[in-house]
Amino acid sequence: MSYNVAVRALCEFTAKVGDLDLRFTPSPSAQEGIVGHRTVASRRNAHYQHEVALEGEYQQLTVRGRADGYDPDANRLEEVKTYRGDLDAQPANHRQLHWAQVKVYGWLMCQKLGLTDIDLALVYFDIVGEGETLLHQRYSAAELETFFNAQCAQFLGWAQQEMQHRAARNSAAQTLGFPHAGFRTGQRSLAETVFKAVTTGRCLMAQAPTGIGKTIGTIFPLLKALAPQQLDKLFFLTAKTPGRKLALDAADVLHRSHPDLPLRVLELVARDKACEHPDKACHGDSCPLAKGFYDRLPAARSAASQVRQLDQRNLREVALAHDVCPYYLSQEMARWADLIVADYNYYFDFGAMLFGLAQLNQWRAAVLVDEAHNLVERARSMYSASLDQYHLKTLRDSAPEPLNKPLQRLNREWNALHKDQLAPYQAYASRPDKFLHALGLCTSAMGDYFNDHPQALSGELQTFYFDALQFAKVAELFNEQFIFDISKRQHSGKRSSSTLCLRNVVPAEFIRPRLTAARSSVLFSATLSPRHYYADLLGLPADTAWIDVESPFKAAQLKVRIVDQISTRFVHRQASLEPIVALIATQFAQRPGNYLAFFSSFDYLQQVAQLLAERHPQIPLWLQSRGMAEAERQAFLEQFTEHSQGIGFAVLGGAFGEGIDLPGARLIGAFIATLGLPQLNPVNEQIKQRMATIFGAGYDYTYLYPGLQKVVQAAGRVIRGQQDEGVVMLIDDRFGEARVRQLLPRWWAVE
């Protein structure tokens, strides 16, 4: 058995030493890096070869990579590194790593061409000034072979351990039995379809009812596919923290039912959640866990590889036992884990770590996207950007002297953008190029300043800098699938300021490559209707398979009643209060127990709750409030017990509309007094126009489909198990319309 390793991954394992140091940042974006590499290549002679594929072997290791460029006339191999700022500020251990990479490439090139020596060069390309700094040195093939063998020998012990782990993992997965007594109705067909999708290398969209056990029903078949499909990794991606917990719980069930399954499970959490020293910067002169990080990493990595469930708590224990940063240890362990549980952004965002690692290491990965109905909005936000002029004003008042002029110039261009705008909100047909030029000059000046004053890389200045970089990055991608708009607001006197926004409304072109790069991508949710909406907005491949999984529940378990004598539209809201209160009170009297009542806003919720409390003071009520902390949300849910009775009031689409589990008597019914339609405002109206232009269905794509999705998710809280029975009341006359009813789940028997 051989072990494949990329040149970069090999060198990052063997040649990274010293401190973790993020001061020489932020590095150029991937797009800027590509442009930089092309610019360097375009300056070379006609014989210059770029992206040269190289490969070599050392015992069981196969080392592969692509050298940036080779000039046969000068016998020079080049490794190109793009940067911004002051090159002299680059830490020595970064330079050492770069030399290690080019020396490995150098030996592979000598071997390929039969060379006795070669000139090796590091080409540092400044993406702002477009200047090159070239560092080069002549090496004999014998020297480079010695260096290559030393790196491989250092890595080989770990590689052998990884091969043994992988063989044991695959063998155990082959004989893995389903961890429960049997499959639930629909769960087996879901698992079989997931297995078929990964076998045929296709994308799968699976609509499966809430309560079917989708998490284990999708993870289990992919584990069975590890060996036959030669999968390296499984990525389980979630929209919210509760989804991560479900996946970790499923992995725990598998580990407990199969103690011999050597499956390494890793949870990735955001840096601000994992940071032990939020008041310190990420470098050895500030943070003790960054000091000597790479010197202590091998021992920490080895210890972490022995822990099967590296959730946030377990990983933190290992990290602190070895005095390394938990967040950056988790990033390292992503290279060695089998099942990685993480937020969507780790795979779908601009600089998504998991996607980048998968591309670099050529992993065969299978991707599971949990609660995939959330991916449309989340993806839109990933590829959008905004800037607030008020933040710029506060910065200008306190900015260091070298940044005064660039910030003033930016503000002048900003004011010019909205000076003729009469309405508070206005969308524009093209991007603001003159403003973007000023923004580029400003971020360049800020980057230079941060390189000279690394201690300033914090607070409002840093926040604005990163926001500006994101804005510039999104502007490069601007096309008809984006909207550029300006929201203007008046301050005291005649002064006004504005917010600029580049909104992505169709993320398909960014999501599609991520879906197709995986061996198989499985997107699953209880609400993936209608198909064309998701296919259009997520850019699903043409051969995507679809399954609408049979519900494990009988229609008789859930009484769904449409109350179409009431309108919940804003203009009818006052008139709706009395009949809604009467409806809730009547149902509660007929069948006392725990109910959730969903409304379109906090104001509406409070009006109904207040009237209900006045008319029926004997009915216990508890209300969701704005901006509830996690502990408050937990306290709200804890009021739903097996023996309690009362009505919980919540906002549709909020924290209690999906992702919560209240089985049995903890919840026996829901009142949904809204269609869940997104707010009627200028932004949504602009999106509606764009959806109409692109897809010919502006209202449906902007309002109806996203609204009904929330309704079905909220109703899905009621029936969670085979023995549950409950009632859902859909309160609004529009629920009676045929086009609305056809979007409701097929298994519901609607009255």
Image: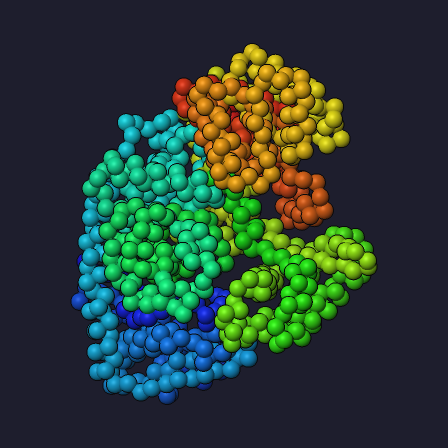
Q: Residue at x 65, y 34 (%)?
A: 601
Q: Eyeballing the image, is 209 above or below 231?
A: above
Give the image location of residue 306, x and y in percent: 24, 51
Q: Eyeballing the image, is 678 above or below 343?
A: above
Residue 342 seen: yes
Rendering quarter of residue 383: bottom right
Side of 438 where 669 appears, left or right: left
Q: Quadrant of the C terminus?
A: top right
Q: Eyeballing the image, is 28 above or below 391?
A: below
Rendering quarter of residue 442: bottom right
Q: Eyeballing the image, is 78 above or below 689?
A: below
Give the image location of residue 223, x and y in percent: 30, 43
Q: Residue furthest top?
A: 590
Rendering quarter of residue 12: bottom left
Q: Residue at x 59, y 22 (%)?
A: 729
Q: Residue at x 29, y 62 (%)?
A: 297
Viewer-closest of 3 and 615:
615
Give the image location of residue 283, x and y in percent: 41, 67
Q: Quadrant of the N terminus?
A: bottom left
Q: Residue at x 65, y 56 (%)?
A: 501
